Amino acid sequence: MAANRTPIGSVVRPPPDWFGRHLMGAWATQGPCVGAISIIGLYNNASDGSVIRVYGLNYAAGAATQIYFTKYQGTLGTLATGLATPGMMYPGAPLEWGQVWTLPSAASQGTVFGAVTAFGNVAYDLAPGYPLGIITPGWTFALQTNVTNIILNVGFRFLSVYD
């Protein structure tokens, strides 16, 4: 008998599905700036100890580049407002934690823990089914280019949970 079998009537679903009502999304753009790399980060502004789990990313860059996943404490740059304000994917659900910050920077920020490759003006979707990053309160999960003077677009799909 297979070890992964479940009792009759049980359902196995990934965590984002169980908490689908609480999933949030946010999108931001950092325009090109001469001599600076583009950085877009999701900051955990929770005051109750909740962590943010990033389950999906949409990203695109204006030219071929590596896009680094970084983490750093606090916020840098400008708080993205308007359409970039995080919102619930389920209509009528209350807002959870999370803020998006954008920054042009002459130097890399934070600690790099992963990377993806982007080709110019091609949109990518990354949703492996497990958290791409877990953000504790007071920290930022950011994507940043390694090439200067290009536009960066990033969409986050995330879940705020109390661990």
Image (cartoon, rainbow, N blue to C red):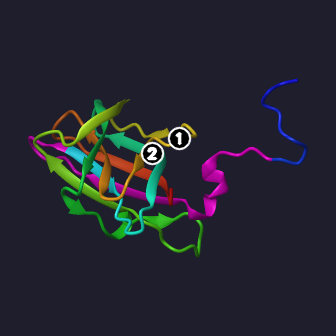
Q: Residue at x 19, y 56 (%)?
A: 76
Task: Specify start and end residues of the magenta stretch as a single range.
Answer: 11-37
Q: Amino acid at mark 1?
A: Ala
Q: Residues within 10 Å of mark 2 (few under 14, many from 20)?
A: many
Callouts 1 and 2 close, C-beta under 8 Å = yes
Q: Is 24 situated above or below 131?
A: below
Q: Amino acid at mark 2?
A: Leu
Queried whether the magenta region covers residue 12, the answer comes back as yes
Residue 11 badge: none
Label 2 sits on residue: 57
Quadrant housing residue 147 = top left
Label 1 sits on residue: 127
Q: Secondary structure at mark 2?
A: strand
Residue 132 location (% of width, % of height): 45, 41
Q: Residue at x 39, y 62 (%)?
A: 98
Residue 144 location (% of width, % of height): 26, 41
The earlier-in-sequence mark between 1 and 2 is: 2
Q: Residues within 10 Å of mark 1 (few under 14, many from 20)?
A: some
Residue 47 location (% of width, % of height): 37, 69
Quadrant housing residue 36 = top left
